[in-house]
């Protein structure tokens, strides 16, 4: 007899919870469309970044930052881009230390400066120099990409599940920590995932798993994109694709041609899917705006002479 009342009460509670969650999501920094523009919204207002960037290793030492903060304040910056290093936050597998990140956030907050964190995870300027020692020292578990002569290079292969899983776990823990200490204060307003990704010194990874993927049919997701955008594909590979007949099915060579441009497109796709997984894990913990930057190609240079795939919108 009382079930309808109970059902209605539960439904109202559900609506209230969803509305509260929506309001909380809007309170954290987020992107918002305004006409044809996209605005960064911080604490309910459009925020224009007047920013600077720290050196690659500046934020690894809080004492060193004590000498940097006054210089930043004299520049009248409202935001700084600051690296966070995988090797420092997870020096031992599964054991996390966010003391450097904590000091960085508190230091910026004390000076009313916002932060954009740069995640130096699997890759920084193509190389895997900021991965932890326990990753770097285990070539078997955490495979490296290989060049055209099948020689391992200091770049984690994006085709290895163990590489993705380890980076994803660390990045998720980072975002969980940022939410814990900054979810109400909003000192951190954006996050860059990885840094200047690209393959060197060859156009593509020649790891066995990469070779297997390269000789297989293009992924269904890419095939669907090509079918749906046949008249207006991404300009980065439109000319290559059109020269090969604008196919929407087949191996990478069959769809894009047997050339170095195809190898770069191939790498851009798999670098992109890798970063997409890392980003999704971080956003699941704390849904801040996230982006990836690019290592641009150099005039008259071939992919691999510049970081291959970095110029694509991965």
Image (spheres, rainbow, N blue to C red):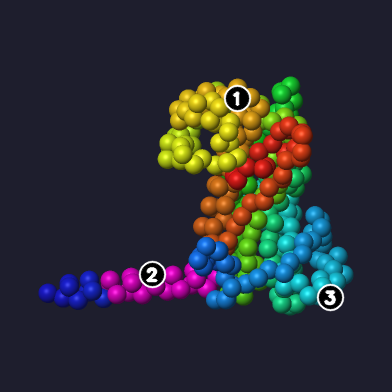
Task: Pick the quarter of the image with the N terminus.
Answer: bottom left
Residue depth check, mark 3 versus mark 1: number of the one nearer the observer: 3
Picture disc at residue 74: 3
Mark 3 or mark 2: name the one nearer the start of the chain.
2
Q: State the residue at coordinates (64%, 59%).
A: 191
Q: Where is residue 12 in the image (x, y as percent from the top left)?
A: 29, 75
Q: In this view, does 16 lie above or below 258?
A: below
Residue in the foreground of this view, choosing between 114 and 142: 114
Mark 1 to mark 2 CA distance (whole Å): 46 Å
Disc 3 secondary structure class: helix
The quadrant holding residue 69 is bottom right
Q: Is 22 displayed left or right of 173 in the figure?
A: left
Q: Position of residue 2 (x, y in %)?
A: 16, 76
* Residue marked by disc 1: 211
Mark 3 to mark 2 CA distance (whole Å): 44 Å
Task: Pick the quarter of the image with the C terminus.
Answer: top right
Q: State the residue at coordinates (68%, 54%).
A: 119
Q: Does the magenta stretch include residue 256?
A: no
Q: Where is residue 223 in the image (x, y as percent from the top left)?
A: 46, 34
Picture disc at residue 58: none
Q: Is 245 displayed left or right of 304 in the figure?
A: left
Residue 203 seen from this side? yes
* Residue marked by disc 2: 18
Circle 2 crowding by C-alpha within 10 Å: few under 14, some 14–19, many from 20: few
Q: Is residue 20 magenta?
A: yes
Looking at the rendering, the stretch of residues picked out in magenta corresponds to: 10-28
Circle 3 crowding by C-alpha within 10 Å: few under 14, some 14–19, many from 20: few
């Amino acid at each position: 007899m009382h079930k309808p009342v109970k059902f209605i009460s539960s439904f109202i509670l559900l609506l209230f919870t969803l509305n509260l969650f929506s309001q909380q999501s809007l309170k954290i920094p987020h992107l918002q469309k305004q006409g044809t523009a996209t605005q960064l919204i911080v604490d309910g207002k459009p925020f224009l970044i007047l920013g600077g960037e720290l050196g690659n290793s500046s934020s690894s030492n809080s004492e060193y930052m004590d000498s940097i903060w006054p210089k930043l304040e004299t520049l009248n910056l409202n935001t700084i881009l600051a690296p966070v290093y995988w090797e420092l936050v997870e020096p031992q597998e599964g054991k996390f230390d966010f003391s450097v990140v904590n000091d960085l956030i508190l230091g910026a907050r004390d000076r009313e400066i916002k932060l954009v964190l740069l995640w130096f995870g699997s890759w920084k300027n193509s190389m895997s120099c900021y991965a932890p020692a326990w990753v770097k020292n285990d070539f078997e578990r955490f495979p490296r990409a290989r060049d055209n002569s099948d020689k391992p290079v200091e770049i984690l292969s994006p085709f290895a599940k163990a590489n993705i899983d380890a980076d994803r776990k660390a990045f998720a823990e980072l975002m969980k920590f940022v939410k814990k200490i900054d979810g109400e204060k909003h000192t951190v307003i954006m996050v860059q995932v990885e840094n200047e990704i690209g393959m060197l010194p060859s156009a593509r990874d020649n790891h066995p798993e990469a070779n297997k993927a390269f000789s297989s049919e293009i992924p269904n997701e890419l095939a669907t994109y090509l079918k749906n955008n046949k008249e207006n594909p991404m300009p980065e590979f439109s000319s290559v694709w059109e020269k090969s007949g604008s196919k929407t099915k087949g191996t990478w060579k069959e769809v894009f041609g047997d050339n170095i441009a195809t190898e770069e497109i191939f790498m851009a796709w798999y670098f992109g899917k890798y970063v997409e997984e890392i980003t999704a894990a971080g956003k699941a913990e704390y849904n801040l705006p996230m982006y990836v930057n690019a290592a641009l190609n150099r005039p008259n240079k071939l992919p691999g002479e510049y970081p291959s795939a970095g110029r694509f919108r991965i």
